[in-house]
Image (spheres, rainbow, N blue to C red):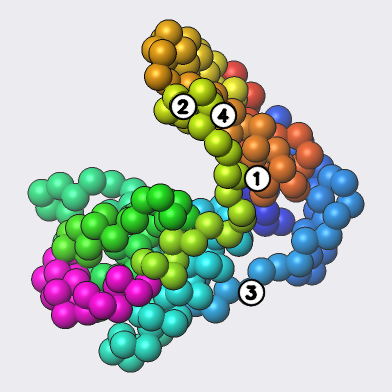
Amino acid sequence: MLFTNEKPPLLPKALLSLRETFRIAGNTLISAKKVRYPLITYKSILHKDLAYVLKDPKQTEVIYRAYLQHIFPVLPKSSENTVSFLNDPKYSTPLEEGNHDTRASSEEEAFSKALLDVVRLFGNPQFSPHKALIQALKEQGPVGANYAQERPSEIIQFVEAANIPPRPLPNKEKKDGRYKVAILTTSASGGNDSVARALSSFLEKEKNIHPILIDVEIIAKEEDPMMLATNMHTYDGIYSSIFQKTN
């Protein structure tokens, strides 16, 4: 909603004022720092959904390119889907008695929904999301389960191609031969930060563990789309500074 020209009346005043830090001219977003970001043209509904979930254009391209190379060519050609897979009731309300059955009705739908369920697991070569993707396919019902059984090699090839980090990962030697444990937290939420620091202090007492506390809010200030647009808040920062203070 923040990146449209409409101003919903129910938004807090602070959020409306945040909209004034950037503007949209045609198909270009002009940020608070006057940097111009052209509209990204998505090749399909899945491409757009991946970008929405990941909030990372580079990682999105890696995964979608792997999809086009290994999955799309072997999918039965059907009518083009015009509704976001994220609009499925499954993503907003739990499947309860009386709700619509959200199991996939086509192989394309099954794979797309399964991928969106586990896509955040991709991008780490030290961990393969293959098993998670297979399980997600099975949860899409008979269509997804059959696809997982009939296309094992294509799925393996896809995972190998999609699980590549879009940026080089730092390669550091072990510190004093101890295990390094990364603890992710966000300073945008005081409760999470406090727990993470307490956990870090606890692990520091272990002789064979070297904890590393990573504040994703600091990293987000360089990559987060909302920060790039407003130069004021990240997505998490908006929740902390506006919604938590007004509710």
Q: Secondary structure at mark 3?
A: loop
Residue at mark 3 to residue at mark 4: CA–CA distance: 33 Å
For marks 2 and 1 on the same chain, the one whose residue lies earlier in the sequence: 2
Residue type at numbered disc 3: Thr
The crowding category of the residue bearing disc 4, from other C-alpha atoms within 10 Å (few below 14, some 14 to 19, many at least 20), is: some
Give the image location of residue 76, x and y in percent: 28, 89
For marks 2 and 3 on the same chain, the one whose residue lies earlier in the sequence: 3
Q: Secondary structure at mark 2?
A: loop
Location of mark 3 (residue): 41
Location of mark 2 (residue): 177
| Main SS class of the magenta portion in the image | helix
Q: Secondary structure at mark 1?
A: loop
The crowding category of the residue bearing disc 1, from other C-alpha atoms within 10 Å (few below 14, some 14 to 19, many at least 20), is: some
Residue type at numbered disc 4: Ile
Location of mark 1 (residue): 224
What residue occupies the far bottom of the structure in this picture? Answer: 77
- Say whether residue 147 is magenta: yes
Give the image location of residue 114, x and y in percent: 29, 62
Residue at mark 2 to residue at mark 1: CA–CA distance: 34 Å
User: In the image, is residue 213 above or below residue 65?
Assistant: above
